Amino acid sequence: MYRFIHFLAVIISLTFAGRAFALNATFDAQNNLLTLPTVNISNNTSYTNVVLRVTSFGTVVTNDKTVGKNIEFNLSRNALLLPKVTVGSTTYSKVSLTGLTFAVVSINGVSIDTGSNGSYNLSLVITASGFTGPAVEIKNVPKPNTQGEFCSADIYTQFQQSVQGITGSWSVTSCSFDGTTGFINALLTVTSPFTMSMPYSVRYTYVAN
């Protein structure tokens, strides 16, 4: 199931990234959880409803004039830029976190399995509506041994959930695996509050670490 959950989390993010979301980040100090309603990666790729477990804040600057109107992770600066972040009852403006270290807990409410018992790094590449997104790397995951394991029954189970009030379904139309690289072709169907069908494909590449 972990393979299915990973690519669903990413395809949801890519599909609905352009919609309007609140920009106020929140930090749960008790659990070290930073919740980002939406985040742009160097103004190129966007993800929504991202929860991070912070292990180090790096260098923290408030009232940083380089922070814009959107939450952004600037790759060249290795900095997370937050227009507003609420900690407890206090809200801080224009906060930059340079050298931040973290683990991704979830995307769009879908848990991300860290795969701590695996010995492979997995690269996911999604192509949808003619657009190929950047590779998403997931470290330390187990690798299926056969096509039967990769294309197991859980892959073909239709998955439904509501994402920011949008209800959709996902179904897999084909699946293959050669022991290192796998391909899944699927169909995303949105039923509410608007209707849309979009075929897409996901390439999985496993590399021993």
Image: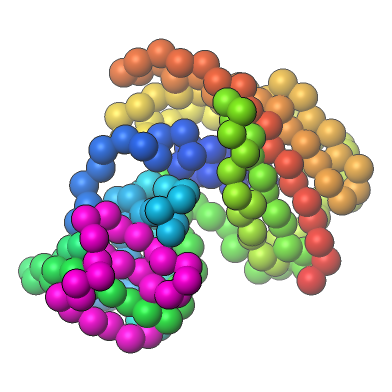
Which residues, given as a range, are shown in magenta? 58-82
Q: Residue at x 48, y 63 (%)?
A: 104
Does the rendering let one see residue 89?
Answer: yes
- Relative to residue 40, is residue 19 depicted above or below? above
Q: Main secondary structure of the magenta part?
A: loop
Q: In screen coordinates, is 138 left or right of 90? A: right
Most distant residue in the bottom direction: 59
The part of the image, by quadrant, that contains residue 171 is top right
Task: Looking at the picture, tell me which residue is in the foreground, 149 or 188.
Answer: 188
Q: In screen coordinates, is 161 left or right of 25? A: right
Residue 52: x percent and y percent?
Answer: 40, 65
Q: Residue at x 64, y 35 (%)?
A: 127
Q: Quadrant of the N terminus?
A: top right
Residue 13: x percent and y percent?
Answer: 46, 42
The part of the image, by quadrant, that contains residue 80 is bottom left
Task: Looking at the picture, tell me which residue is in the foreground, 150 or 137.
Answer: 137
Does the rendering let one see residue 4?
Answer: no
Q: Residue at x 58, y 57 (%)?
A: 113
Q: How many marks?
A: 0
